[in-house]
Image (cartoon, rainbow, N blue to C red):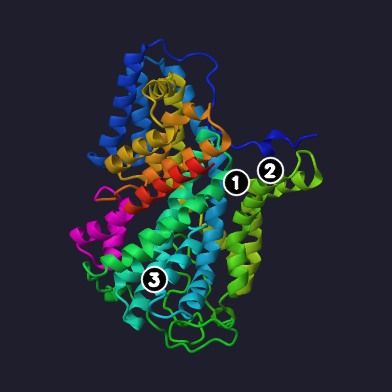
Amino acid sequence: MPPPPALTEPLTILAAPAEPVTTAGDAQLVIAALLGIAAVVLLIAWAKVHPFLSLILGAAVLGVVASVAPDKMITSFTAGVGSTVGGVGLLIALGAMIGGLLAESGGADGIVGRIVGRVSGRALPWAMAGVAALIGLPLFFEVGVVLLVPIVLLVSMRTDVPLMKIGIPALAGLSVLHGLVPPHPGPLVAISSLNADLGLTLGLGLLVAIPTVIISGPVFGTIIARYVPATAPAALLPTRRDAGRTAGAGAGQRDVDGDLLTDDDLANPGGGRPGAPVDDSGTEAARRTPAFWPAVITVLLPVVLMLLRAIGELTLDEGTGGRKTLDIVGTPIVALLAGVILAMFTLGYQAGFNRSQVSSVIGGSLPPIAGILLIVAAGGGFKQVLVDAGVGNLVADAAKDASLSPLLLGWLVAVGIRVATGSATVATITAAGIVAPLAASMDRPAVALLALAIGCGSLFFSHVNDAGFWLVKEYFGLTVGQTIKSWSVMETIISVVGFAGVLLLDLLL
């Protein structure tokens, strides 16, 4: 007997309407879609309205122009919001919990210290790219930047390696993982919207991510360091405390000077994770850095479980005991929950936190993602109005008539919305909703590649309307022009190289 559908079928956030919500003609629907998307773009880029409100208002514009009855418009929008939160929200929350424990425990600092402390100056860019990709698996991009930048600045200062030469690889590792690999919000939304297989998309995403990180990170970083001289802002450099070393600190891990890493090495151990910081007053003597390999295993556990499920689907017969077990443990919610539970012990208790402090870290990881969840939810509502009004079917028919590749269409739509709004998440949500009908006639690998093509397009050319642009500018002490030459060009390389990798896989599969 096959496992229950809830455990074996990909999550979907596309709710089929019970009946047509509008009788508008094709031309009217096209105009409605264009005006709805334009409303979102203008509200975000020009009026500076929060994306959450912009998506709600954009859905209203779309519905009104498409002659959708108000009650049906509201029903469609709320159905999209509910199914999106139910399908994606839990995964984002669990991923944030792992990231919070990794940051606050100092586990991320331990991973960074172990790797960069054992490589030469020439290999540092490659090491930083690898570190960023590793700890970027459970961390949101902004949190990863806050966590890694102080370490990048410190390594650059102590090794005399140009800041851009190791900073760009770190940013590339974080950005590629953010755009292509679950459990980040963008890939999860694309996977759910297209009804793609999560494990397969994860595996293919990692294949695309590796060469993309190499080219946009160490290779481009070495080139751009010659043209963008950057000086680490003194105020952001981690400073050494005078409290002395703690008895149980280090766990054999060393910083870039070869000294044992302790909580006293940096003024802000844990990387300054936004949210509710741990109150460890009176317990500093018990704080210790989690061991390297347990921290790495904790980060990789959810990814490995989801990949094992995908391998089981390809190699094991349906209904066998092994297949059923892998279907259960590899379900995204179960895999991430297992990661959270393991992180409580290997990162929380191992770092010397008591039960209330572990609870505080987990709780503190949720408020920072509230805005992301709201944007994703509203985007799901906007997309559902697009789907229910029939806009997606129009796009699918037009693509078939024009013989336009669904992969190219998804990438181009995501690129346009990304450049206009500055939001990778909004670009992913909207593009996935527009091309979702195309996925119905595609096989499993092609649908997974479509999700990755949209993810690549959502990273294209970050500029002044993107919060990440200003985050990088301020953290690295760059001018606007220098940020465009380095960060914006790096994002464009990621988008183009990643999409080229998707097209190559499409030829091979």
Q: Is residue 353 visible?
A: no
Query: Residue 412's quadrant in the figure?
Result: top left
Do tag 3 and tag 2 residues touch (Cβ < 8 Å)? no
Depicted 148 relative to depicted 304: above or below: below
Disc with the residue nearer the chain's start (1 vs 3): 3
Whole-number angstrom distance, CA of label 1 to CA of label 3? 30 Å
Do tag 1 and tag 2 residues touch (Cβ < 8 Å)? yes
Query: Given the image, on which type of amino acid does mark 1 rest?
Result: Gly
Query: Given the image, on which type of amino acid does mark 2 rest?
Result: Glu
Disc with the residue nearer the chain's start (1 vs 2): 1
Given residues 116 and 251, the one toward you in this image is: 116
Reply yes or no: does residue 470 show up in magenta: yes
Q: Which residue is mark 1?
A: 199
Query: Given the image, on which type of amino acid does mark 3 rest?
Result: Pro
The secondary structure type at the circle numbered 3 is helix
Q: Which residue is mark 2?
A: 313
